[in-house]
Every structure is written in C-alpha cells, then in structure tokens.
Image (cartoon, rainbow, N blue to C red):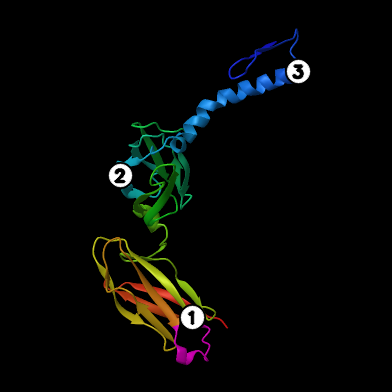
Amino acid sequence: MKITLQPNFPHKYIITTDKIHPIFHNFATKLKNVAKLIPYILLLLAPSLLFGQRARIDWEKTSHDFGRIPEKGGKVSCEFIFTNRGEAPLLIRHVESDCGCAAVRWPRRPVASGDTGRIVVTFNPQGREGKFLKHIAIYTNATPPNHSLCVSGTVTRSFADVLGEYPYQAGQLRYDTTAVRLGRHPYRVVRLLNAGEKAVGIAEVKVPDHLEVHVTFKKLRPKEEGYVTIALRSDTLRHHHQESEIVLLTDERKEIRVNVTIVK
C-alpha cells in the first residue's frame, strides 16, 4: 500500500508497506459500499440541496365518477395521471385511502422533472349497495406537499337479487315477513316491493285497537320498495294481547296478513 499526502502540505509524505492491514481493508470495503448509495441519496435530497428547486404536481383530474356499477360485477379501476412540472424530482412518500374497499397503486420511484406518472384506484363494490364517495390522501415532497383524490358512484343490485329478499307475494306486491314480535322492541317494519309493471298501493288496513300501523307510501312504482311500520299504542301498553293479526288490502284486492306476537 502506498499513501501520498502532498496538497496543502509543506512536505511530501509517503508511507509504503508490503501488506494491507485488515483495518484498512475493511474501511475500504465500507467506503466502496457507501459510494454506491451516493447517487440515490443525492436524488432524494436534491430538492433540499438545490436552492429554489421544488417538485410540483399537475393533475389531469382529481376526481372520478364510476357512475352506476353492479354489486356483483367485480372490481372497477380508474387512473389519475399527473406530471411533475417542477425542477426537482417528485417523490410520493405515502398514500392513504379512507376505505379498505378502495385500493391504491402509485409510483415508488422518484418522478423526474417533466415526466408523468399515474395513480391507480381500484374499488370493490361487493356489499356496498348505494351511493359512495371515497377519498385518497397523497403525501409528497412537492409544493404544495399534500393532495386529495376522490372516487364516487352508485352500486346497484340486480332485480333478481332484490326479489330473493321478498319470499311472500300478494298480487304484484311482495313482502319479506308474515310475523313480527313486539314488546321488547316498540315497533317493527315490514318491507314491500312492487314486482309488477303497474303502480300498486294499500287501499285498506285492518288493525286491532292496541296496534298502530303506518304505511310510508301511497303507491309503489314498478321495482320500488316501501315500508309498513307496526307498533304498540302507548296508551294500551299495560294490556298484553298475546296474538293478533293485521291485514293490508292492496289495490288489486289482495291481502297481506301479518301475525303480531306481543312478548313481555
């Protein structure tokens, strides 16, 4: 090994040895490994080291509406494309979704100045009937650093799936139960569905004096759902009628009979 020290020294020093000491060998190996990491370290620290240079995200869009999607149609995806309009590399540090039903993929490597990238959001509609709005938070080294994306839409069920929830039928109307229990619960709800092609309503209600029945609709349009609420009257709670029945008479003169059991 030969070491020469000459810049800024008044004399020239030369150290010569036939063999490299293990300490120097280990030091040289570690120095070589650190040298390999220097380009990556400089790339990550570049925005801080370069005065006045910052990354800046320019989004093509920050929201996406999936529209109406079937619940059993499988997962759906969309892309959010962005461009780094800044002078320094763009690094997406972290991404958070407010729901496990919305999975996110994003670039893990820095995006150079002028380059584009994309964030892919995949939504799973299974078990999420109705309207939805999900937000995704993006944390970066850009200016400004934090950004928000959102996806929305409406998850729908097939009519065949809906019909399976209404096993009983009275003409065009179908309903979900023929018996309810009151007492511990002050009221119960019977759900109805118009499975026909014409609007149908409840023309008459036959109800015992100790019960109250409230119909939440005048007429149900085809494929529309409605509710009938059955409750104990507050002024007759002290009387316990074990079994009773209410009868709903439809426009088609079909009867919907519901047995009511009162428990203490």
**Among numbered discs 1 and 2, the one appearing first in the sequence:** 2
Q: Residues within 10 Å of mark 3 (few under 14, many from 20)?
A: few
> Callout 2 environment at 10 Å: few (<14), some (14 to 19), or many (20+)?
few
What's the amino acid at mark 2?
Answer: Lys
**Near-viewer residue (256 or 183):** 183
**Residue that appears at 23% across and 64% down:** 198
- Please tell me the numbered disc located at residue 61: 2
Give yes or no for contact between labels 3 and 1 (Cβ–Cβ under 8 Å).
Answer: no
Closer to the chain start, of discs 3 and 1, is 3
Indicate the position of residue 54 as horizontal and vertical percent values.
Answer: 39, 39
Q: Earlier in the sequence, mark 2 or mark 3?
A: 3
Magenta region, residue range: 232-244
Rendered-image quadrant of the C terminus: bottom right
Query: As drawn, which residue projects farthest toward the top?
Result: 18
Q: Is residue 166 above or below residue 18?
A: below
Residue, disc 3: 22
**Residue drawn at the location 40% of the way across and 34% of the way down:** 88
Residue 207 figure quarter: bottom left
On screen, 259 above or below 41?
below
**What residue type is disc 1 on?**
Pro
In the image, what residue occupies the spot 24% across and 66% down? 199
**What residue is pinned by disc 1?**
186
